Image (tube, rainbow, N blue to C red):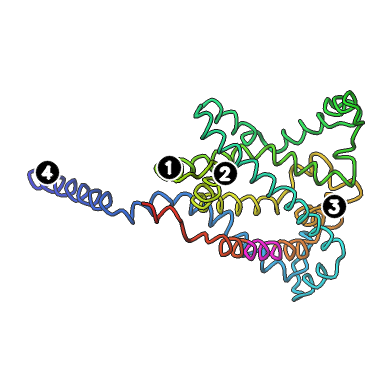
Amino acid sequence: MAAVSKSSAYSAQAEVGLLSRIANNEKLLGYLFILPSLIGFVAFFAVPAIRSVFISFQEWNLLTAPKYVGLANYQEIFADARFWRSMQITVTYVLWNIPIQTVLAVFIAVMLDKVSNSAFLRGIMILPWLMPNVIVGLLFLWLLDPTLGIINEALVRLGIGRQGFFGSPDQSIATIAGVNIWRHMGYNAILIYAGLKTIPKSLYEAATVDGANNWVQFWRITLPLLRPVLVFVIVTSVIGSFQIFDTIAVTTGGGPAGSTRTIIYYIYDQVFERRINMGVATAASVVLFMILVTVTIIQTRFLNANRSDLAEYS
């Protein structure tokens, strides 16, 4: 009986010692915390992504066995005028979305920091981002309806006249960009606002003593010290903009006249609408992935993402 008690005590001490070593090992604790997310990433992102590269070299309609065709799928998409048109539309959307969204987010963040620190206002800012894209798309589809939409009614009363918005080939992509700017600018403003809080107030006080006005302080202190946050906001916004789909699917369905058929919609079209061609669709996905990697590298290098001016003042 005594031997059993000693064995149990020794086992308990060993477990306590193991837990203590784990608790004191910060690197091991870090890996344990990210393990659930890592498993999900590998199972649902990494493995499918690697498999898609292999599928891009095959002809596969989901009904028959895959057939290896080499670079034929890539040759097909590069020779397809619809692929290049979809890339042009996507780039147009990005150029509408990113500059306006970023400028508005910075403006809102600065106003929150200078005028009000209200948690209620910050909560309101993030509400649009919490709404699903499908709901936002339906909401603006009703608001901008050419016949019954309240915004068109307001434009008529102002003497401007009704606008096509989603139904106009010339306005549709800008309208979709406007919808997504409304949805994301508040969230990005909160991120930038958090970055503003890391800037020492003493820098502004010293600049004021030296005679610098608010505009000079913004360009010489605020923007340079916000670089890490701005890089994160811009890079993630660009990646998300290249993958725009749900707003388009709900509001325009790629129309009118293909004016909102972005690259993701082209990929969707290859699988579900024109024909079931997983090879061509995944080849286009791989090309999009390489474009996003290239754009991200260029952005981080151009914006000096690995350097923070704030470190010079810490």
Quarter holding the N terminus?
top left
Badge 3 local density, few (<14 within 10 Å), some, or many (20+)?
A: few
Disc 3 residue type (three-letter): Glu
Q: Secondary structure at mark 3?
A: helix
Residue lying furthest left = 2
Side of 280 where 102 appears, left or right:
left
Side of 213 where 131 appears, left or right:
right
> Is 293 inside the magenta-drawn segment?
yes
Where residue 179 sits in the image (x, y, percent)?
74, 39
Q: Which residue is mark 2?
A: 215
In the image shown, does 310 or 127 lie closer to the viewer? 310
The magenta span reads 286-295
Q: CA distance from mark 4 to mark 2?
A: 75 Å
Disc 4 residue type (three-letter): Ser
Q: Which residue is mark 1?
A: 209
Badge 1 local density, few (<14 within 10 Å), some, or many (20+)?
A: few
Where residue 12 sits in the image (x, y, percent)?
18, 45
Q: Residue at x 62, y 59 (%)?
A: 48
Q: Residue at x 81, y 69 (%)?
A: 78
For residue 273, the mark is 3
Quarter where residue 112 is shown: top right
In the image shown, does 170 or 82 lie closer to the viewer? 170
Q: Main secondary structure of the magenta part?
A: helix
Disc 2 residue type (three-letter): Trp
> Is 130 inside the magenta-drawn segment?
no
Mark nearest the camera among 4 and 1 is: 1
Up the image or down, 163 lies above or below 36; here it is above
Up the image or down, 301 lies above or below 308; here it is below
Side of 18 where 273 appears, left or right:
right
In the image shown, does 29 or 292 lie closer to the viewer? 292
